[in-house]
Amino acid sequence: MQLGIVTLFPAMFAAVTEYGISGRAVRSGLMNLELFNPRDYTTDKHRSVDDKPFGGGPGMLMKTEPLMASIAAARRAVEKKHAAGADKTKVIYLSPQGKTLKQDSIIDLAQRESMVLLCGRYQGIDNRVLESEIDEEWSLGDFVISGGELAAMTLIDAMTRFQPGALGDEGSALEDSFSNGLLHSPEYTRPQSINGQDVPEVLLSGDHEAIRKWRLKQSLGATWLKRPDLLQAMSLETEQEELLEQFKQDYLHD
Ligand code: 9D3
């Protein structure tokens, strides 16, 4: 995947390019990031990247000309690299006004060959840049962070997990929490006992069918307790209904 990233803070992207699963995907060429700093596209003596909003009010906006020039450069760079005949590279603006990213949207976005990610700073961008240059707006959710970089990195990390081969031994992105709409069941590692708290017997039994049922029951129960909104939005199969009923009975009685 070819990513052109427009950001005033390119150094922040070391968090994805140098660490963990995304770091490995970048080193192997699975994910290719090219960073474009609007500051490098300024023409004034002070290299200004912010400007005052017309009409007044608190805060600044990103300065338009360096922003436009850096978006254009990012678009040219990724379009040069990705396969001819592919769909037009979309420009995605990470913004609090965007649609909230969900695992389903990540899976869709992860299929693309290329994209430009625009990270906003200050109070955002001129509305004409939004209308003429931005194809999609995505948000992390209804809370405030200081700029688009952490959102872009979150998106990159989440998309990386769906690139073929990106998860070595770490499992399958399709088996993650949320992929079946439920939270994951509890997991245990050694030792078998800590301060009198023991690993559930069934996990030591070697009975794969019993373990599958136990995990599904715990998964349904955890979702019922912690994310009832997720259960509300789905229809359960007969086995799932029964296991959730059992979980509720157990929960009531101890
Ligand atoms: C003036 C009111 N706010 C606009 C809705 C101000 C404002 C808040 C946060 C302006 C910019 C920002 C910076 N945030 C992001 O760039 C951002 C973000 C977020 O704040 N929350 C969730 N997802 C995202 S993605 C990018």
Image (spheres, helix red, strand yellow):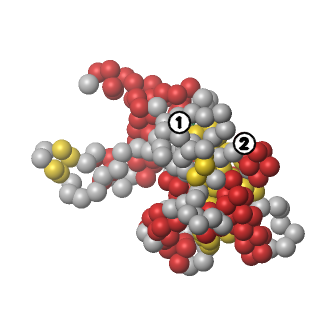
165 horizontally vs 128: left or right: left
Q: Is mark 2 within 8 Å of ligand 1?
A: no
Closer to the camera, 55 or 126? 55
Q: Position of residue 140 (x, y in %)?
A: 55, 43
Q: Residue at x 55, y 69 (%)?
A: 166
Q: What residue type is labelled 2?
A: Asn
Q: Which mark is residue 123?
A: none
Q: Position of residue 253 (x, y in %)?
A: 29, 21
- Give the crowd class for mark 1: few <14, some 14-19, many >=20 residues within 10 Å: few
117 horizontally vs 90: left or right: left
Q: What residue type is labelled 1?
A: Pro
Q: Residue 58 carries which label?
A: 1
Where's the C terminus, which quadrant?
top left
Secondary structure at badge 1 equals: loop
Closer to the camera, 129 or 150? 129
Residue 186: image quadrant is top left
Closer to the camera, 186 or 48? 48
Closer to the camera, 52 or 207? 52
Secondary structure at badge 2 equals: helix
The residue tagged 2 is 127
Most distant residue in the right direction = 85
Task: Determine if residue 155 is in view.
Answer: no
Task: Determine if residue 17 is in view.
Answer: yes
169 horizontally vs 32: left or right: left
Most distant residue in the front direction = 45
Q: Which residue is drawn at 50% across and 70% down?
A: 17
Where's the N terminus, which quadrant?
bottom right
Residue 2: image quadrant is bottom right
Q: Position of residue 223 (x, y in %)?
A: 45, 34
